[in-house]
Amino acid sequence: MPVPATDISPFRQRRQRVLEHMRANGGGVAILPTAPQALRNRDADYPYRHDSNFYYLTGFPEPEAWLVLVAGPDGDRSLLFCREKNLEREIWDGYRFGPDAAAEAFGFDQAWPVGELDQRLPALLANQPALYAPLADSTALDRRLRQWLGAARQQARAGHTAPDRQFDLLAVLAEMRLFKDDTELQLLRRAGRISAAGHLRAMRHARPGLREYHIEAELLHAFRYEGSQAVAYNSIVAAGANACVLHYRAGDTELRDGDLLLIDAGAEYDSYAGDITRTFPVNGRYTGPQRTLYDLTVAAQEAAIAATRPGAHWNAPHEAAVRVLAQGMLDSGLLQGSLDGVIESGAYTRFYMHRTGHWLGLDVHDVGGYREDDGQGGRRWRTLQPGMVLTIEPGIYVRPADDVPEAYWNIGIRTEDDAAVTTDGCELLTRDVPVAADEIEAIMRDGRG
Ligand code: GLY
Ligand code: MN
Ligand code: MN
């Protein structure tokens, strides 16, 4: 029998924390389905990826599964509904735990076939004060919740009550997931190392005449070879002017001598995402204008990294990066005016139009609020605290225009690393692949032999 890939105790502890939260609010029932299997074309499926919230609380990898948590008068219960054993299907598709083995292996108090949801949920909801479920997240889920609540209400004449309060379970989980536990930090470090291995391999293989898809193949080779189960998001491999298209994919553009190559790619490891961007010269040496903007981006990233520490607010790294980038835009003639002027007017957004980071975790753009109550009826940026994990990814993108120095036309640069906030600063998870221009040039020189 397959065993769970990882120690199940973190999943149990997270379920316990949700139950404690529910109990502190008077108790109730939480309901959470995993993601459906998605059809790609005709009868071919996309590779299955479980729902991040469901996985966070269960570690259970199969589709057609539901978690039910009960914080009731008789104590806490952690219940799973999942597919039954089916030897015929298992011959074709592989092992299924089935309820009995799943309960044992993943530490549930009880598990039932997923086909018994309609029969069991009304009774589980009866006489509970509150329902915790994803709020307005999917019409399919809303329909089922309505059906179960309706069935629970119909037991009124038998003296039962149905929950009369609903809370958004997604909000509870988003706040929990914002603070990574030790298990998660280990997995994020591993995802970061694997992602870095992919970028190193890409640097070593890049040369004029290859195409973007050749480099994507090198990334995927390294990710998979190092044990990653999937990419964390579609890889961006953008040669030359393509780097100025922020959501470009890997296409078939040729890597030309003298051009830069921007790669934004990350591996997923045991469901946790790596997210790295590096920008390097196809021929192994940055030109003068490329180097000017490259060093500027690295300096902006260093300023943002220095601002990533506990007690700082969420926007501090962005503000630090913008100041450095805006000054560099003035120094290089991309912008005219004063530093405060181009920041206040937003003139710098012509060349730096995205933000400097996002939360990172089970999802590449992870859950978690960016603002919090300020205690005076307003909202302020969230304060960074140990255990939060974010990306730090400044960039500069110069499209051709008459009022822009031609030397910089079509240069697109981004440098992105993943950082975990620590007690006194941050730990960079992705620096197995360097960012300094000299170090990158040395790797490309040595890698080519
Ligand atoms: N690769 C997605 C991002 O950097 O946000
Ligand atoms: Mn990225
Ligand atoms: Mn990112």
Image (spheres, grey):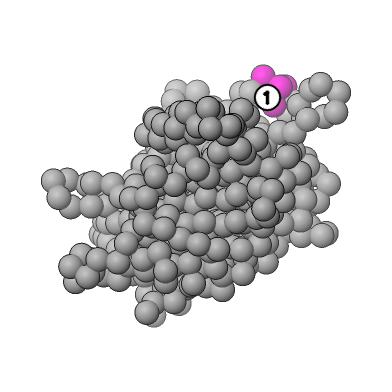
Residue sitting at x 18%, y 52%: 44
| x and y, in percent, of residue 109 in the image | 55, 63
Q: Which one is in front, 51 or 398?
A: 51
Q: Is residue 257 above or below residue 107?
A: above
Q: Is residue 5 magenta?
A: no
Q: Identify the main secondary structure in magenta.
A: helix
The quadrant of the image that shows the C terminus is bottom left
- 163 sits to left or right of 45: right
Residue sitting at x 45%, y 23%: 402
Residue sitting at x 42%, y 55%: 81
Magenta range is 341-345
The residue furthest right is: 376
| x and y, in percent, of residue 137 in the image | 47, 33
- 230 sits to left or right of 170: left
Q: Is residue 384 above or below residue 156?
A: below
Q: Which one is in front, 145 or 422?
A: 145
Of helix, strand and loop, which one carries label 1?
A: helix
The residue furthest front is: 158
Residue under label 1? 342
Residue 202, visible in the rendered structure: no
What kind of residue is marked 1?
Answer: Val
The answer to which image quadrant residue 263 occupies is bottom left
The quadrant of the image that shows the N terminus is bottom left
Q: Residues within 10 Å of mark 1 (few under 14, many from 20)?
A: some
The answer to which image quadrant residue 77 occupies is bottom right
Residue sitting at x 61%, y 28%: 164
Q: Is residue 54 above or below residue 145?
A: below
- Mark 1 within 8 Å of ligand 1, using the beta carbon: no
Q: Is residue 89 above or below residue 402?
A: below
| x and y, in percent, of residue 375 in the image | 85, 28
| x and y, in percent, of residue 140 in the image | 37, 34
Q: Is residue 342 magenta?
A: yes
